């Protein structure tokens, strides 16, 4: 336990030095430029409800969680996605139950004369719905959930309140087999579809 606490303190110090601040910030460091020479496990888990836990204890210091979320990194190892907290010198492998980022806000913004749909995560990331960041449904533990891909191979999941708001901003169309949600962002209609649940007979 003491070793893990030392790692947490070192990680915090390294990130503060790299970002130049100990305050909550959404400035994402240039992780793609960092080439750490050390990889080690760290007993941190991001649960499927978005909570961060360290050694069985929930992390309640939001500024620290936000700082760690800003250096989330994912790589594919033997076909499996593996998650890390990445610093200039080290990568710390962590456990992610479903996805590491969670969207709790949806809004429309005007930019260069176009109306865009933007999503904000619980850690302050902003993701714009466009050709590179599109929505899709996927199953987790038998439940269909709505996701969007974002930075560094990471994925964000829409929480229920954000999903309901998104539906209000779009148009829903039903067919015999699927429900389709049409959402306009940046002058383009994005379509996300979900199979209908079998009707009871």
Image (cartoon, rainbow, N blue to C red):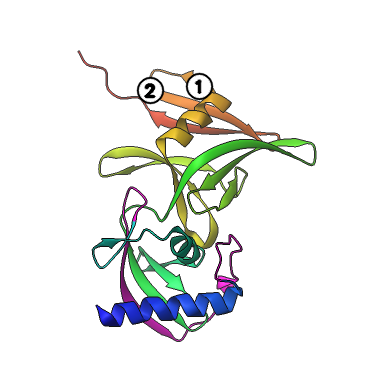
| Range of magenta residues | 22-51
Q: Position of residue 189 (x, y in %)?
A: 62, 32
Q: Earlier in the sequence, mark 1 or mark 2?
A: 1
Number of the front mark, 1 or 2: 1
In the rendered structure, the answer to whether residue 17 lies left or right of residue 55 reads right
Which quadrant would residue 146 be assigned to in this image? top left
Q: Residues within 10 Å of mark 2 (few under 14, many from 20)?
A: few
- Disc 1 to disc 2, how far (Cα)? 14 Å
Image coordinates of residue 151 in percent, x first then y, are 54, 59
Residue 46 magenta: yes
Q: Main secondary structure of the magenta part?
A: loop
Was residue 184 drawn as part of the magenta stretch in this picture?
no
Residue labelled with disc 2? 177
Q: Which mark is residue 109?
A: none
Residue at point 56% right, 79% down? 17
Whether residue 4 is visible to the viewer of this picture, yes or no, is: yes
Q: Nearer the viewer, residue 88 or 177?
A: 88
198 or 161, which lies in front?
161
Q: State the image coordinates of residue 66 (x, y, percent, origin top left).
A: 48, 60
Residue situated in front as seen by the camera: 39 or 199: 39
Res. 157 image quadrant? top left
Q: Residue at x 53, y 24 (%)?
A: 168
Tell me: residue 39, above or below residue 32: below
Q: Which mark is residue 172?
A: 1
Quarter of the picture containing the N terminus is bottom left
Indicate left or right for 167 with 186 as reference.
Answer: left
């Amino acid at each position: 336990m003491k070793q893990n606490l030392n790692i947490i303190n070192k990680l915090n110090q390294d990130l503060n030095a790299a970002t130049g601040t100990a305050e909550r910030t959404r400035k994402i460091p240039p992780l793609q430029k960092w080439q750490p020479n050390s990889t080690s496990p760290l007993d941190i888990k991001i649960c499927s409800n978005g909570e961060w836990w360290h050694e069985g204890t929930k992390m309640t210091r939001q500024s620290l969680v936000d700082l760690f979320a800003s250096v989330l990194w994912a790589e594919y190892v033997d076909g499996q996605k593996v998650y890390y907290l990445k610093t200039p010198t080290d990568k710390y492998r962590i456990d992610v139950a479903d996805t590491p980022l969670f969207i709790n806000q949806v809004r429309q913004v005007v930019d260069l004369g176009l109306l865009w749909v933007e999503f904000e995560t619980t850690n302050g990331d902003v993701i714009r719905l466009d050709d590179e960041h599109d929505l899709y449904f996927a199953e987790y533990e038998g439940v269909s959930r709505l996701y969007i891909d974002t930075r560094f191979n990471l994925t964000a999941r829409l929480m229920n309140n954000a999903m309901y708001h998104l539906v209000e901003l779009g148009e829903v169309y039903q067919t015999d087999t699927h429900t389709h949600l049409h959402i306009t962002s940046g002058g383009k209609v994005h379509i996300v579809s979900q199979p209908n649940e079998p009707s009871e007979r």
